Structure formats: structure tokens, C-alpha cells
Amino acid sequence: MTKKPLQQFGGDWSADKLERVRKYLGAYTTILSKYPYRIAYIDAFAGTGYQILKSDERADQLLFPELAEQEPQTFLVGSARMALQVRPRFTKYIFVEQDHNRFAELEKLKTDFPDMAQDIIMVQADCNAYLQDVCLNYNWKKNRAVLFLDPFGMQVQWETIKAIASTEAIDLWVLFPLGVAVNRLLRRDAHIGDKWRQRLDDLFGTPDWYDQFYQRRTRQTLFGEETTTEKVGNFDAIGHFFINRLKTVFAGVVEKPLFLRNSRNNPLYMLCFAAGNNRGASTAIKIASDILGK
């Protein structure tokens, strides 16, 4: 009996995402190879993938039913393996994964790439705790990195984003959970529980999102004035708000991120890019903008 692979990575939209990041990594290592920096590729969800939908699972009972469609079932090369294949290569590769089973699968990369094994660092940890520690307590003067944050949902905290930007040495590719999480939580009736409000506060790093996405409106009815709170934040507004948040901490941010959509043309995620170093920001933004715009 053939054993099913443990990791499945999405369909066309996921392939598109990885191909764009791959193009940037190649351009990045080509440019940085001319400078005396040690360069690293950091993947904070290196073992995360989309599992095959079992026959006894119903899509309408899943938190993210879009990912149960036929489209995202194709097996693709994951981001960690993709980065290891980029040439010129990075000095070091740091793969972070918290899940035990995924981490075990990830460790097999050292066997698959034996000539690079000594430069592959595996970290089994929560990405927020690990990245905040590395970014805030590491000397970045002679080091540069590209960091890929590819969460399934809302795992990444704003404090982590801010710590990454504070290094002034890391270029960030981040997958923002636009449709699969954020828009779902922004109920039309504005009745958002305290738990989910806090999660959104942690994601955006501010409670100001509420006033951006909701407005109080007064209508005249047969029984007098009626005041209600209504959702006014659509996909574009949510995306614009997150991009503006990135601009408060990074040297440069691509103004037009890429919306990754499912077969029904519904936005699932938003692929964003931010440059960490002020000196190299203009070049990085130009390259990333071109890659995202194609």
C-alpha cells in the first residue's frame, strides 16, 4: 500500500505564491552575493501545508472550506525545499515549525540536500516567540535575511512584525489571511466577541481597525431615529489598512499586494512585501513590485 504524503500544499494560487517568492529569492541572492554580508533565508511556517480532505470530512464543517476544493489538492514543492533550490544560494537556512509531525518531515530535508545540511538550522518553536527573540537579541549589522511568513490563519502577531522591521536588515514576504480569517471575523452586524476582537488587535497591532471597518448610521423610521453599526470594510479596505500598518514600521512596502483567489474568484490571502533596510529599500521594492504585478 502506498503511503500518502503528510504535506499537501495548495493549488494554482499557492503555486503562484511560491513562484513569485522564488523569483525574489533568486534576485536577492544574486545582488547580495556582491556584498560581504552573511545572508539567511528564514521560513517561519516551514512545515505547514494543506492536508488532503478525507472522504468522511464535509467541506461545510471546515473552518476554511475553500481549501477543501479540488483546486488546492495538488501536491507542490513546499517553500523550504524551494528556497534550498535557489541559486546563488543563501549562507544559512532557518526553518521554524512548531508541530511535531511536520517538524519530523521537515528534518528529512537534510538528507535530501546533504551538501547543504550543515547550513540548515531546524527550530521547533512558536514562530512569534522565536522570531521576536532572534530579531531583538541578535546583531544584524553584518547579516541580512529574507523572511517568509506563510501562516494558515492569524498566527502571526503584530509584535512579531514590528520586531522584524526593527532589525533594518530583513526583507519580509508575508501572507495576510484576508479572506480565510479576517473578513470572516468582521461580522456585518458588528457583533464580534471579545476573544476575536483581541485576536484582531494582536494581528493589526491596534484596535483602530474597528473604526476603519465599521460605521454608525442613523436612519429615520416610522418609530423615530434608529442608530445601527454596519460593516463598511470590504476586501480592498482591509488590505489597504494592513499595508498602511506595514508602512509604519518598514523602510518600504509594495503598495499593490497580490490577492490570491480561489476558483470562485474570492480572495483567500494577500501576498505582501516589505523591505527592511532603508539603503536597499528602493531596489527591493522595485523588484518585488515587478514580481507581484506580473
Image (cartoon, rainbow, N blue to C red):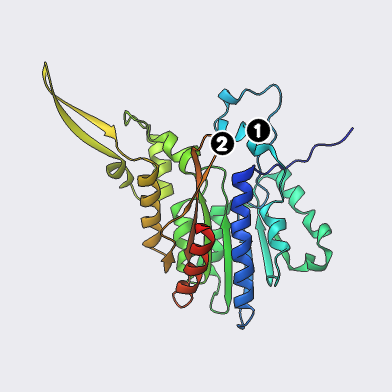
Residue 205 in view: no
Q: Is residue 14 left or right of residue 136?
A: right
Residue receiving disc 2: 263
User: Percent x, y for residue 121?
Assistant: 71, 62
Picture residue at 53% right of the left edge, 78% below the top: 141
| Picture coordinates of residue 159, whole percent (x, y) | 45, 56
The x, y position of residue 6, in whole percent, is 75, 40
User: Tag 1: residue type?
Assistant: Gln
Quadrant position of residue 8: top right
Total marks in image: 2
Residue occupying the far top of the picture: 222
Residue of label 1? 70
Q: Which of 69 and 2 is in front in this view?
A: 69
Residue 190 falls left or right of residue 90: left
Task: Say which element carries label 1.
Answer: loop
108 left or right of 255 in image: right
